[in-house]
Image: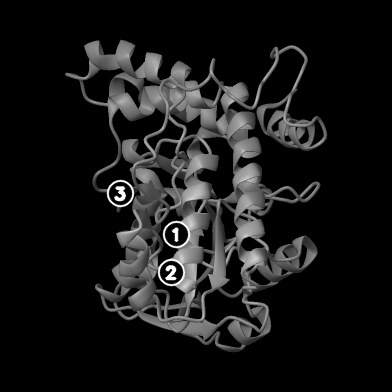
Amino acid sequence: MKSIDRRQWLKKASLGSGFTLMGGLGPIAVSGKELIATPVDTSIAKLNSNENPFGPSKRVRSAISKAFDDACRYPSVVFRPLLEQIAETEGVPTDHIVITGGSTEGLKATGLTYGIDQGEIIAADPTFQAMLRYAEGFGAYVHRVPVDQQLGHDLNAMSQRINNKTRLIFICNPNNPTGTLLEKNQLRDFCSTISQKAVVFSDEAYYDFIMEPDYPSMVELVKEGMNVIVSKTFSKVYGLAGMRIGYLVARPDIASRLRKNIMAMTNVLAIEAAKEALKDDAFYTFSLTKNMEAKNALYKTLDDLNLEYIKSHTNFVFFKSGRPISELIPAMKKEHVIVGRPFPPFYEWCRISTGTLPQMAQFDTALKKVLS
């Protein structure tokens, strides 16, 4: 079974098996005692950065420890095997892959490549800002198109902003901070059509959390030779946010341009961690199932308080608190819960990341106290 097909199978298996997956991998229990190294500290519920509270897994930690002997070497020692592993996972040749220091470096390198010298970029508003703000620093003009009434990408309005100066259209799908997901046929049709006019960037940082059957990655369009760039990361489901490693997938000529603007890149320990993470199917499935549990707990809290929220396709939930976020953040911090930053223009909305179930209980108690 190909790696990418196996990932889809694992998702479906975790959904339909009561959070226990049996088979060649052995049992994957909800407790995950065999998968995670130490209990998670719950003195402060850090729920503001969409991190995986359980990772790195035991297997990945072991790989990192073994890699210290090579930590005195430059990453070229272990770079090629990861490149080949990612290429196999995505089903493309290695010249389609650009390894980066987290997907954020890939976003910034792309913003520089296409935004410099007054290039124009089109993006939803709100969305993840790393690329857009970096590009603006090099003279780009960013068309920020308000999300629609369902807080999703307004693709029609975005397409109407295209002109002869447009170099890039940025799509974060699922979107951060709203958690919304574009309908798969609409997404593919938009990317296929618009990529004939400008490069389309599909930020798939949260792709692993999508549970819709057969939902496509836009890597499919890269394989068809279209003007499409896809970014992915090891920060979320794999629990490696602190290691800083991700990658871009693009046609070789585009990948070559992007590679020239990579600056920090990554490191030996992160590379070895990523190599092992791609093989650790048990932890991958564990992360997805625990994320589902946490989201259900979040939904219950918000339902109890009769608060509006968006059903999320990610590891966070965007909800309407009805209170200025500038007031909610310090009030929740007093209750030892850290929530997401402001996302203009939604100043009375809050993004809350999933955590452990004890952290979700902390959030429940704190929010009900703060809003009472």
Q: Rate crowding at label 1 as few (under 14), some (14 to 19) or many (20 or more) other CA atoms within 10 Å.
A: some
Image point (66%, 57%), residue name: 300
Q: Residue 370 carries which label?
A: 2
Q: Quadrant of residue 239?
A: top left
Q: Does 259 appear above or below 328?
A: above
Q: Are marks 1 and 2 in contact (CB under 8 Å)?
A: yes
Is 242 left or right of 187, judged from the image as shown? left
Looking at the image, is mark 1 or mark 3 nearer the viewer? 1
Is 332 left or right of 308, judged from the image as shown? left
**100 or 102: which is nearer to us?**
102
**Residue at the spot of label 1:** 366
Give the amino acid at mark 3. Answer: Ile
Give the amino acid at mark 1. Answer: Ala
x, y (%) of residue 365? 49, 56
Q: Whole-Å distance between the Cαs marked 1 and 3?
A: 42 Å
Q: Does 261 appear above or below 332?
A: above
Q: Do the residues labelled 1 and 3 touch (CB within 8 Å)?
A: no
Image point (39%, 40%), residue name: 42
Q: Is mark 2 on a helix, strand or loop?
A: helix
Q: Which mark is residue 262?
A: 3
Specify whether residue 222 is in view: no
x, y (%) of residue 85? 53, 26
